[in-house]
Image (spheres, rainbow, N blue to C red):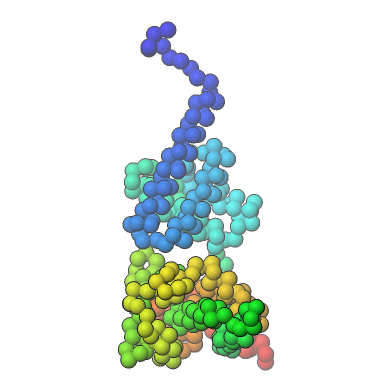
Amino acid sequence: MTAYDIVLLPANTKKEGDRVDYLDKMKEAKADFLSHLTYNKGYSKNTSYVYSSDLNIWSKWLSDREKDWREVRYTDVEHFIGWMMRDKGVKAHIANRRVSCLSSFYKWANHQGIIDHDPVHLAEKPKIPSRIPVYLEKEEQQKLRAALTDHENIPKSIFGKKSKYLIEVRQRYEMLFELIQNSGLRISEALKLKVLDIYIVDGMAKTVRTVGKGDKERVVPVPEKFGARFGVWLNGREKGEYIFAMKEGGPPPTQNAARKMLKKMIEKAGLDKHITPHKLRHTYATRLLEAGAELIDIQALLGHSDISTTQIYAHVNQERLAGVVAKL
């Protein structure tokens, strides 16, 4: 046999080798894409984690069908959507989020010259039914605040005394949830705030500066009544300290810890609603709408890049009116 003789490998060996190659290339591309999101786009760790999870689902779906991610077409994306919603029971808004992730990934890969086409662009996306945002009524807000400020429900130590630490923890979460309801900040934005991000005049907090999605900065004014309480609570803290630090000079609590505490307080308040920190953001937007704010103002305050995202709040008053008419 000479060096120029052709050795024919079994078909399945070649196929398996190709499969390993495109899976490795997918892993490499995904890692580079996530680095791009984190370091170039300024996305949070939580957002990058969601993108990574969505891409893993797509990669597994392709692998099970022995499809090369670099050669897929829009029909494959549509089949993927059908599989999610029909076979896995995934809701339309989750399916759309995953398709949006794929769109960002393939646009990036195309720009990098890894692929020569965008298979997501022409794919038909699932229609998302209009949903009325969940929020707290004013009376429910009062009940939540009462539960947060009620230190009687804080457990006592074995010596019959209430822990100073537990009281401070409760007060920290009270201020966190109050801030979201008075500024509309995302939970991720609120937790990473430092004292220097708050503009204080004569002991009163006037505005909150935050950097949101897409590394966009915005300055949000806060109501006077809350600003006075917030200013007092911040008094004496170091400028570079995290506002909601678990201990002096330390990091803030995790988003998961905040969600668990809010759930616990919602139960203490006797509210029969699924309220998350994001629903407190909805509550803020609803109060703005009731006060006569225009959608474009709410868009700016919430940091929405697209007015269509804000338009869900236009349905709130319609729902309220329908409820009033139903009582006639």
Give percent across and percent down for residue 38.
38, 57
Residue 101 seen by the camera: yes
* Residue at 38% from the left image edge and 42% from the top image edge: 115
* Residue at 48% from the left image edge and 47% from the top image edge: 74
Q: Horizontally, is 115 left or right of 151 in the view?
A: left
Towards the viewer: 250 or 184: 250
* Residue at 56% from the left image edge and 45% from the top image edge: 61
Give percent across and percent down for residue 150.
59, 87
Q: Quadrant of residue 211?
A: bottom left
* Residue at 64% from the left image edge and 81% from the top image edge: 159
Q: Horizontally, is 255 left or right of 326 in the view?
A: left
Give percent across and percent down for residue 265.
60, 79
Residue 118 seen by the camera: no
Towards the viewer: 53 or 103: 53
Q: Quadrant of residue 64?
A: top right
Towards the viewer: 281 or 198: 198
Q: Horizontally, is 234 left or right of 176 in the view?
A: left
Instruction: Look at the picture and state if 275 lies above or below 120.
Output: below
Instruction: Look at the picture and state if 79 lies above or below 41.
Output: above
